[in-house]
């Protein structure tokens, strides 16, 4: 709705998208608004504590390795385009021009949709820059940025009006599409399939200049979002409780990898094979773990590191996870629950 805080909206049937707040808002804004489904946190498998202790302990020796930041591009724009390459914007322009618009519904003669003209990559760059500006300079309505001061109403001047008119901005907001509807992304369900390409680019870029050190951390996170979607949750014990849940791996506050999450008993972390019920007698692989533990192993595997130490909280800690990580040469540090199966 135009009266709400500015968000990225996508036309019906068009591409909808994350990784960043902008992406999540672009993905789900079009689906309307409703309260996310209650989610009091991911359920933890209850395991009986061990009744005996081992006779021999072999410590895992992990050499400390500091993180490294490699040489960055020579301009902020080049760095930005590492995460959002020009080739992707070219594709978005093509997808947007192919967008069917609002469909066969009756529209008033002379409406904005009738004034649509194909866009170009150069124009989309300006449009995206305006969206970023709006995230920094918040106003109640989109159109407020284009309103000028009057005798009895003093308003700030926004330089973005020099680069794009409000009707054109509105048209692009309605028709913007960032995926090819004819393509199929294997293993990534709707709606995340629509942003899989951009997500992969961002995750690859995140470690292009940052070489992870020994100590990393895995936790669940939430991207604030109040739109209507089957993948939104309402985790009321979190500061930003309502939104899209993700599993994330980071170091020193820098996000390196993430995995989408679909709520529901038969769902879970997207693209992660995990054990559904029962116990594995000798866990050595990610697929032998329950969902919350498998996601830790999967995130670490995606970094392609040979050794390291991961910090987790008691949502993830357990004998099976620590066993699998040790098998991979990865140490673990974390709090535990009484039902984590640890002596």
Image (cartoon, helix red, strand yellow):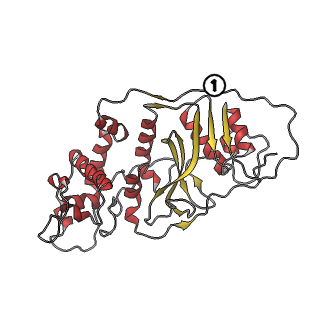
Q: Nearer the viewer, residue 212 or 156?
A: 156
Please, is residue 214 above or below residue 246 in the view? above
Q: Relative to 278, is 29 on the left or the right?
A: left
The residue lying at 66 percent from left, 27 percent from top is 62
Q: Quadrant of the C terminus?
A: top right
Percent of width and height locating residue 316: 66, 48
Please, is residue 66 above or below residue 260 in the view? above
Percent of width and height locating residue 168: 19, 59
Q: Quadrant of the N terminus?
A: bottom left
The residue lying at 78 percent from left, 48 percent from top is 341
The residue lying at 52 percent from left, 61 percent from top is 241
Outermost residue toward the left in this view: 151
Q: Quadrant of residue 103?
A: bottom left
Q: Nearer the viewer, residue 187 or 69?
A: 69
- Which residue matches tag 1? 63
Q: Relative to 284, is 223 on the left or the right?
A: left
Residue 284 showing in the rendered view: no
Q: Nearer the viewer, residue 71 or 327?
A: 71
Percent of width and height locating residue 18: 42, 51
Percent of width and height locating residue 100: 28, 60
> Could you tell me how many numbered marks the image carries?
1
Please, is residue 66 above or below residue 91 in the view? above
Q: Secondary structure at mark 1?
A: loop
Residue 290 showing in the rendered view: yes
Please, is residue 79 above or below residue 2 in the view? above
Q: Nearer the viewer, residue 139 or 15?
A: 139
Q: Residues within 10 Å of mark 1 (few under 14, many from 20)?
A: few
């Amino acid at each position: 709705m135009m009266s709400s805080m500015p968000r990225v909206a996508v036309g019906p049937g068009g591409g909808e998208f994350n990784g960043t707040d902008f992406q999540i808002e672009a993905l789900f804004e079009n689906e309307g608004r409703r309260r996310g489904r209650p989610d009091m946190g991911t359920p933890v498998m209850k395991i009986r504590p061990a009744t005996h202790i081992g006779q021999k302990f072999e410590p895992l020796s992990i050499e400390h390795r500091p993180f490294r930041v490699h040489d960055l591009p020579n301009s902020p724009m080049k760095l930005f385009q590492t995460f959002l390459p020009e080739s992707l914007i070219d594709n978005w322009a093509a997808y947007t021009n192919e967008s069917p618009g609002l469909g066969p519904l009756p529209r008033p003669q002379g409406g904005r949709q009738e004034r649509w003209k194909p866009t170009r990559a150069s124009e989309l760059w300006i449009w995206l820059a305006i969206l970023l500006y709006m995230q920094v300079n918040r106003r109640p309505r989109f159109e407020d940025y284009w309103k000028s001061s009057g005798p009895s109403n003093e308003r700030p001047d926004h330089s973005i009006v020099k680069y794009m008119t409000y009707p054109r901005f509105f048209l692009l907001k309605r028709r913007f599409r960032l995926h090819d509807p004819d393509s199929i992304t294997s293993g990534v369900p709707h709606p995340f399939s629509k942003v899989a390409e951009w997500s992969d680019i961002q995750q690859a870029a995140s470690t292009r200049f940052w070489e992870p050190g020994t100590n990393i951390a895995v936790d669940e996170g939430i991207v604030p979002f109040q739109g209507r979607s089957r993948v939104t949750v309402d985790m009321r014990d979190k500061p930003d409780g309502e939104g899209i849940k993700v599993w994330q791996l980071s170091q020193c506050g820098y996000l390196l990898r993430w995995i989408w999450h679909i709520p529901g008993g038969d769902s879970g972390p997207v693209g992660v094979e995990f054990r559904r019920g029962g116990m594995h007698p000798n866990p050595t692989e990610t697929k032998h773990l329950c969902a919350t533990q498998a996601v830790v192993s999967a995130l670490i595997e995606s970094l392609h590191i040979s050794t390291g130490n991961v910090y987790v909280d008691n949502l993830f800690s357990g004998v099976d996870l620590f066993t699998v990580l040790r098998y991979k040469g990865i140490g673990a540090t974390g709090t535990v629950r009484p039902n984590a199966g640890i002596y």
